[in-house]
Image (spheres, coloured by chain):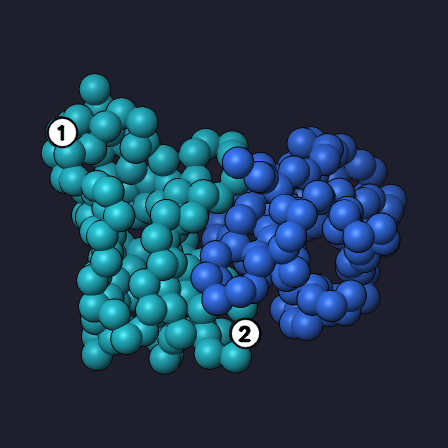
Amino acid sequence: EPEVTQTPSHQVTQMGQEVILRCVPISNHLYFYWYRQILGQKVEFLVSFYNNEISEKSEIFDDQFSVERPDGSNFTLKIRSTKLEDSAMYFCASMWGGGKNIQYFGAGTRLSVL
Amino acid sequence: SQQGEEDPQALSIQEGENATMNCSYKTSINNLQWYRQNSGRGLVHLILIRSNEREKHSGRLRVTLDTSKKSSSLLITASRAADTASYFCATVLYGNNRLAFGKGNQVVVIP
């Protein structure tokens, strides 16, 4: 069964460094998402991406965050200058969009900012 | 913003028993979905119920939706040890696709 893959599974970085989290969505899907889950808290929506542009973003997704679909298969989340509070599990999801409205999630990248 | 809220937070049951979780939300929704998360893993979609539906079944899962009370319940019948996980409800509003998750219910099924 097709699945969303995320790399790396765990990323450790120093505060102030840039990180790029990578995702390969399911190949025929058209909608792409990033969510994050701080330890012990709810899963929170960050951004949605459709037709090569951001379709919606939350208040969390500030100027430090950006997304890109550089080559038609990868979908990346960049954090320009990481903060301690960016430590979380980041989930990528994709959705076909043909009416089923089901998002398929990757296993996540655990980001630890030291 | 719209968010689901589950109740209770943690549930421990014997294998074979039923597990029921509830979720409430605050505004009108397009649909409500339930997801499962095994420890340290991603979210797995379980079932989607639309705002004009009242009940749906999928295998051992039964979901109800009461839009007048703005609440939903997830029932897992004849639970198995493999059902041990966290269960989240998530709502979707009209006009967008973002999932607004609740805090999650941790379910432990004791063999």
Is residue B73 toward the left or the right of residue A1 in the image? Answer: left
Report whether B76 appears left or right of A61. Answer: left
Q: Chain B is drawn in which colour?
A: cyan
Q: Residue furthest top?
A: B111
Q: CB atoms at circles 2 and 1 under 8 Å apart?
A: no
Answer with left or right where residue A8 lies relative to residue B43.
right
Write down the quadrant of residue A65 in the picture: bottom right
Q: Quadrant of the C terminus of chain A?
A: top right
Kind of residue at badge 1? Gly
The residue marked by circle 2 belongs to what chain? Answer: B
Find disc 1 in the rendering and name its residue: B16
Q: Where is residue A77 in the image (x, y as percent from the top left)?
A: 76, 52
The image shows residue A73 at horizontal and vertical percentages of 76, 48
Residue picked out by circle 2: B96
At horizontal 56% and vertical 64% (from top left) the residue drawn is A97
Residue placed at 57% from the left, 58% from the top? Answer: A96
- Chain letter, colour blue: A
